[in-house]
Image (cartoon, rainbow, N blue to C red):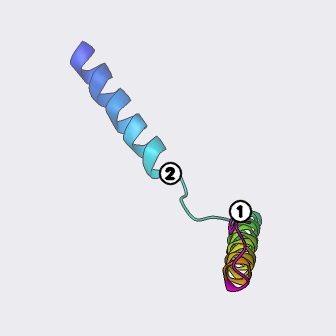
Amino acid sequence: MKIHHLFLLAIIAAFGVSGCDTNDGPAEEMGEAFDDAGENVREAANDAGNAIEDACEDAREGVDAEDTDC
């Protein structure tokens, strides 16, 4: 009798898991797009900051400054 109950429980659990929908809705997709856009902006700002720092260091080296760190 207990085996039948376990078997029935396993079948119900399998149907429950298979009923989960993995497709994202439009709001989820839009949220992910915002997250991606935010990450792209952060990366671009970081790259721009690094380029400015490199240009500053090159300029200081060009005028033989004692401290070339910007």
Which kind of residue does numbered mark 2 sit on?
A: Gly
Q: Is residue 4 above or below residue 54?
A: above
| Residue 38 image offset from top left, x and y in percent | 75, 67
Chief SS of the magenta region: loop
Say which of 44 and 27 sits in front: 44
Stretch of the chain drawn in magenta: 62-70
Q: Is residue 66 above or below residue 55?
A: above
- Where residue 36 sits: x, y (%)? 68, 69
Q: Which label is found at residue 19?
A: 2
- Would you say the residues marked 1 and 2 are in contact, meaning their CB atoms lie under 8 Å apart? no
Q: In the image, which disc is placed on residue 8?
A: none
Instruction: Report how far apart the C-alphas of labels 1 and 2 lie in the structure.
Output: 19 Å
Q: Is residue 67 magenta?
A: yes
SS category of the residue bearing label 1: helix
Q: Quadrant of residue 51?
A: bottom right
Circle 2 crowding by C-alpha within 10 Å: few under 14, some 14–19, many from 20: few
**Of 22 and 33, the residue lying toward us:** 33
The tag earlier along the polypeptide, 1 or 2, is 2
Residue sitting at x 70%, y 67%: 66
Quadrant in the picture for the C terminus: bottom right
Q: Residue at x 68, y 73 (%)?
A: 50
Image spot of residue 11 (x, y percent): 34, 37
Q: Residue furthest top?
A: 2
From the image, tell me which residue sits under label 1.
28
Left or right relative to 33: residue 24: left
User: Is residue 7 inside the magenta stretch?
Assistant: no
Q: Is residue 2 above or below residue 67?
A: above
Find residue 3 and report its horizontal and vertical position in percent.
22, 19
